[in-house]
Amino acid sequence: MDNLKITLKKSLSGRLQKHIATANSLGLKRPGDVTVQPNNAQTQGKIALIGYLLSVETCE
């Protein structure tokens, strides 16, 4: 199974609390933070919610 490299590109300042909580659940707190997550339905749902804040790449 592939993994996803997720980077927070925009600030969480002034965003909805639900979006901030979603970013924190991915391990992203500041712009520039990077995390590697499994490519599954839960991660895809989080990306769909806050995709406008993220950059997503596949990695092996």
Image: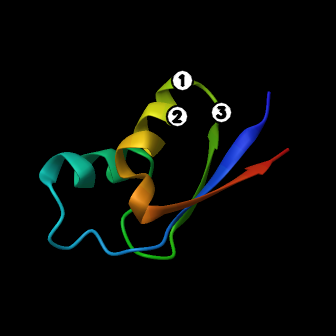
C-alpha gap between disc 1 and disc 2: 5 Å
C-alpha gap between disc 1 and disc 3: 7 Å
Residue 25 in which image quadrant: top left
Residue 16 at x, y percent in the picture: 15, 55
* Left or right side of 55 for 46: left
Q: Where's the N terminus, which quadrant?
A: top right
Residue where numbered disc 1 is placed: 41
The residue at 85%/44% (across/down) is 60
Query: Label 1 amino acid?
Result: Ala
Residue 27 at x, y percent in the picture: 44, 53
Mark 1 vs 2: CB contact within 8 A: yes
Where disc 1 sits, the SS reads helix
In this rendering, the count of numbered labels is 3
The residue at 24%/55% (across/down) is 20
Residue 36 at x, y percent in the picture: 64, 49
Residue where numbered disc 2 is placed: 44
Q: Nearer the viewer, residue 1 or 52?
A: 52
Q: Is residue 23 visible?
A: yes
The residue at 60%/26% (across/down) is 40
Give the class, few, some or many, for how many residues have Cα within 10 Å of label 2's Cα (few <14, many ≥20): some
First in sequence, mark 3 or 2: give its number. 3
Please say if 17 is above or below 43: below
* Left or right side of 30 for 59: right
Please say if 48 is above or below 23: above
Give the class, few, some or many, for how many residues have Cα within 10 Å of label 3's Cα (few <14, many ≥20): some
Mark 3 vs 2: CB contact within 8 A: yes
**Dot label at residue 39:** 3
